[in-house]
Amino acid sequence: MSHIRARFAPSPTGALHIGGIRTALYNYLFAKKMGGTFILRIEDTDQTRYVPGAEEYILEALRWCGLNPTEGPGFGGDYGPYRQSDRKAMYAEYAQKLVASGHAYYAFDTPEELDAARQADDTFKYDAKSRLGLKNSLSLPAAEVEKRLASGEPYVIRLKVPAEETILVQDLVRGEVSFQSKELDDKVMLKGDGMPTYHLANVVDDRLMKITHVIRGEEWLPSTAHHVLLYRSFGWEAEMPQFAHLPLILKPTGQGKLSKRDGMKLGIPVFPISWNSDNPEDAFVGFREYGFLPEAMLNFLAFLGWNPGTEQEMFSIDELAAAFSLEKIGKSGARFDFEKARWFNQQYLMASSNEALATAVKPWIAAKGHQPSDEYLQAFCGLMKERVVLLSDFWDNGAYFFEDFSVYDDKTIGKKWTTESRALFLPLLDRIDEVANFVASDLQANIEAFIAEQGLKFGDVLPILRVGLTGTMKGPAVFDLMALWGKTETRRRLLRSFDLFDQLLG
RNA sequence: GGCCCGUUCGUCUAGGGGUUAGGACAUGGGAUUUUCAUUCCUAAAACACGGGUUCGAUUCCCGUACGGGCUGCCA
């Protein structure tokens, strides 16, 4: 194999879910590993299912993931166009070639007639057995066919599947898979509207784009037999791409492959980025908007159906590419485990530098109406990163860094705050004011000394300080918080809170 | 229904004819920690079933069961 060319070929029929991203990822990793080319091709041959904005969505999702194609619509490349609707004329040409060589034929049966046939017999199949009884250029006299064609009667072109043949598919994931041609139907190659079906388009394009490896979901395995037949019919079988069919991603609960609905049902994201729609039934929240880092999502996804065989779990995208191989792809479906995805994100958050985190967190804080300095934001991230799982947690668990809390842990205060408390804590505030070097260690030493002098225990003092400062019993070390905020702010917060606490006594 | 694919702890998986069947997530217990979290230790937890082949099968073969996919002028 001289130069590897792998493609990701989504259909712009709506938001691309996580399974599609994984397919893109594996194609990307494989190409990268082999020093090959990663190609994006838009498969928009179904005009009835075209959804405006879907192509933009795909591009934006890939961009967010960092899975940028080296060839594709808007990316350049010598094998364009990369949008199938822009290649329409080509397919008709190839379909005609198939007819001319006797590998395909015209069919005039209407969709209604075929529906009726299926209705009457649920095993109905357009194949070698039935086609002579149907309306096509094999069953009709030549003159009749000419007449129908000349009159502009709508037709499709169907592949003439041989009656008795064994078709072997070599799959890189599954090994040899065999099919009997008598089980296969005469698939439509060219539709009534002149557009190709997936089967024709994908074979022609993979050929013309010199694709060497077709890495796609397992749902394509059954139709691969048709694809092999097509390559054979065109005389391309010797240079046919290699196939690798990926195991499906299964629903988090229950059975079946993951679908768009599952996310909404369980309140978890199954899309890389949000998909907005006027119809709430068709609007989805993405991993991005949910607070995931793209690297974490990709790391998680990479392990759904693939494993390097070592015990390393955390992989950067470059490490994934280096470790990747098609042979290590599993065969069985993998259940989507959202808890595991969260864990990966937490690991990435903890491992990130404060600077990188501040950049990622900034928009989340800005959305709440705050524009802290980078320095403050970085310190905030440093103190919070071991206590968050999602980017959204930074605000959810740390809003008090940016604005005064209005609700606080009154259970703790109810237990600890007494009529004597103010008399005790005011001197402590003065004591804190006296700390010359306002850093955590000095603060701790002074407060500890105060506690000892008063004959108190940590538990008598620290909870009050913590809740007074933050409103909650959860969070970073009290002394770190004080050091960050400084004398004035520390005093301000505590005084404000003591007033609040006093109200509890009344 | 037909065809195709699959099946190791609850989940993601490693492994492979003879192993104490390994790791991770989640779960239970414990330690550290002024809180929360982190970290560390620890526990419980799996080769779907039945036949072969073999000295020996979780591993190879065949069935069965179960699961999944496909069965459109959708991809």
Image (cartoon, helix red, strand yellow):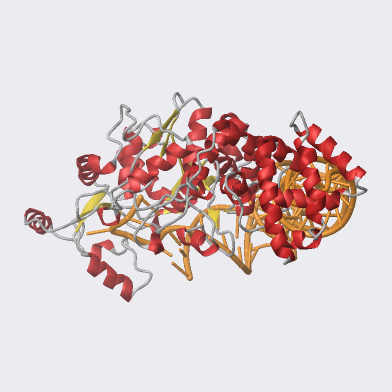
Residue at image coords 76%, 63%: A414
Residue A302 seen anywhere in this rendered image of the structure: yes
Percent across and percent down for residue A200 are 31, 46
Q: Residue furthest bottom?
A: A120
Position of A491 with respect to A462 (left or right) is left
Residue at image coords 34%, 73%: A121
Percent across and percent down for residue B53 are 76, 52
Q: Which of B16 and A13 is in front in this view?
A: A13
User: For the C terminus of chain A, which image quadrant?
Assistant: bottom right
Residue A324 seen anywhere in this rendered image of the structure: no
Q: Nearer the viewer, residue B29 or A335?
A: B29
Q: Nearer the viewer, residue A302 or A374?
A: A374
Vertical side of A299 occupied by A108: above or below: below
Query: How many labels sit on residues?
Result: 0
Residue at image coords 38%, 49%: A226
Percent across and percent down for residue A425 are 79, 49
Position of A199 with respect to A166 (left or right) is left
Percent across and percent down for residue A285 are 47, 54
